[in-house]
Image: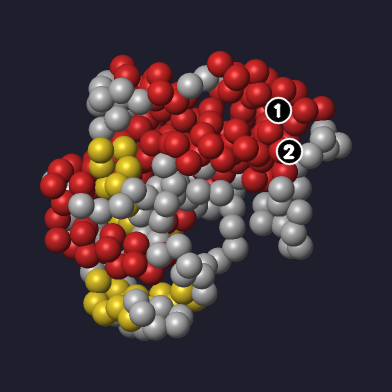
């Protein structure tokens, strides 16, 4: 969801990839294996095939088939690529039947967790000093959040259960000129379609080093009015979450270019 350090190392062979986890305290390796296995069963070819797993090892490892394609991140994502992306996501969202979906845990990120995280961060956030646009965005965001309730966009007509990555980083999607396929399932689990689309549409990877037409992308999905309203709400929440994460990115080296937090503040103000 938010910017973070790498949780794994990757070993590439001719036809296989081994992912060795450096962080596994939250079930990352199990989520990875479960996600690969689930899609291999219900939507084969849309993600790497699971080969072997050492989930109880320290560190745990998951080995999968190697697939081709170029990550969408860092590119000008063309309309053919966006259409292929939408086809893939729609296939994933249709693939896993309800009984199988109900049997797996919620993804690492979900609407309630984002809402709680944002409210806690705003309640305890430092006073700055911030650039003026950041201060304005925080003030406007706090006013919006004071009257925004997740429950109002969480009815049955707004929440369509799906399997999802719960991580909108478009580096996780590979395009080969014809189709888009998925990588990185360590946060995956039961989700809902509106959350998944809001996650992708709000992710910093769609604009900090990429060009991604969010309006065109969202227009490729046959959304209900309630889903569209939920997406709008969750995009605002995610924008606040990202602003908090970027303001907290004080490590060396920074994960994002100078000025990214200010640009995120401008994006948040536009959404609000």
> Which percent across, then down, holds residue 145?
58, 23
Task: Tell me: 166 left or right of 129.
Answer: left
Is 106 situated above or below 227? below
Residue at (52%, 20%) from the top-left corner?
148
141 sits left or right of 176 in the view: right
Q: Position of residue 258 (x, y in %)?
A: 76, 48
Q: Quadrant of residue 83?
A: top left
In percent of the image, x 32 and y 19: which residue is there?
226
Residue 154 x/y as whole percent: 35, 26
Q: Residue furthest right?
A: 129
Q: Is residue 135 left or right of residue 77?
A: right
Q: Could you classify mark 1 by the number of other residues whose Cα lies within 10 Å: few (under 14), some (14-19), or many (20 or more)? A: many
Q: Does residue 248 appear to the left or right of 120 in the view shown? A: right
Mark 1 and 2 residues: CB-CB less than 8 Å, in contact? yes
Mark 1 or 2, which is nearer the eye?
2
Q: Evaluate whether residue 26 shows in this view.
A: yes
First along the sequence among labels 1 and 2: 2
What residue is shown with label 1?
A: 138
For the question of whether residue 72 can be seen, the reply is no
Up-down: is 9 above or below 69?
Answer: below
User: Which residue is depicted at the point 64% across and 45% down?
Assistant: 245
Q: Relative to 201, is 227 above or below?
A: above
Q: Nearer the viewer, residue 144 or 231?
A: 144
Using the image, tell me which numbered label, if any, was put on residue 125.
2
Q: Helix or strand or loop: what does disc 1 sit on? A: helix
């Amino acid at each position: 969801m938010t910017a973070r350090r790498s949780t794994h190392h990757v070993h590439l062979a001719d036809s296989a990839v081994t992912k060795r986890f450096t962080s596994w305290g939250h079930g990352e390796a199990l989520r990875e294996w479960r996600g690969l296995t689930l899609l291999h069963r219900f939507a084969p070819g849309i993600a790497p095939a699971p080969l072997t797993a050492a989930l109880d090892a320290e560190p745990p490892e998951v080995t999968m088939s190697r697939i081709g394609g170029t990550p969408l991140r860092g590119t000008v994502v063309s309309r053919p690529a966006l259409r292929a992306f939408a086809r893939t996501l729609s296939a994933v969202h249709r693939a896993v039947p309800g009984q199988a979906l109900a049997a797996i845990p919620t993804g690492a990120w979900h609407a309630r967790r984002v809402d709680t995280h944002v409210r806690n961060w705003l309640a305890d956030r430092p006073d700055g000093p911030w650039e003026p646009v950041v201060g304005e965005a925080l003030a406007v965001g706090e006013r919006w959040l004071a009257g925004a309730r997740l429950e109002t966009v969480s009815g049955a007509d707004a929440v369509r259960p799906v399997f999802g990555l719960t991580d909108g980083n478009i580096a996780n999607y590979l395009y080969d000129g014809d189709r888009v396929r998925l990588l990185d399932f360590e946060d995956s689990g039961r989700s809902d379609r509106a959350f998944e689309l809001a996650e992708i549409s709000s992710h910093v990877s769609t604009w900090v080093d990429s060009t991604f037409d969010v309006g065109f992308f969202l227009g490729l999905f046959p959304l209900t009015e309630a889903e569209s309203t939920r997406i709008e709400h969750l995009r605002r929440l995610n924008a606040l979450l990202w602003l908090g994460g970027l303001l907290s990115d004080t490590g060396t080296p920074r994960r994002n270019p100078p000025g990214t937090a200010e640009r995120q503040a401008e994006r948040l103000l536009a959404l609000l």
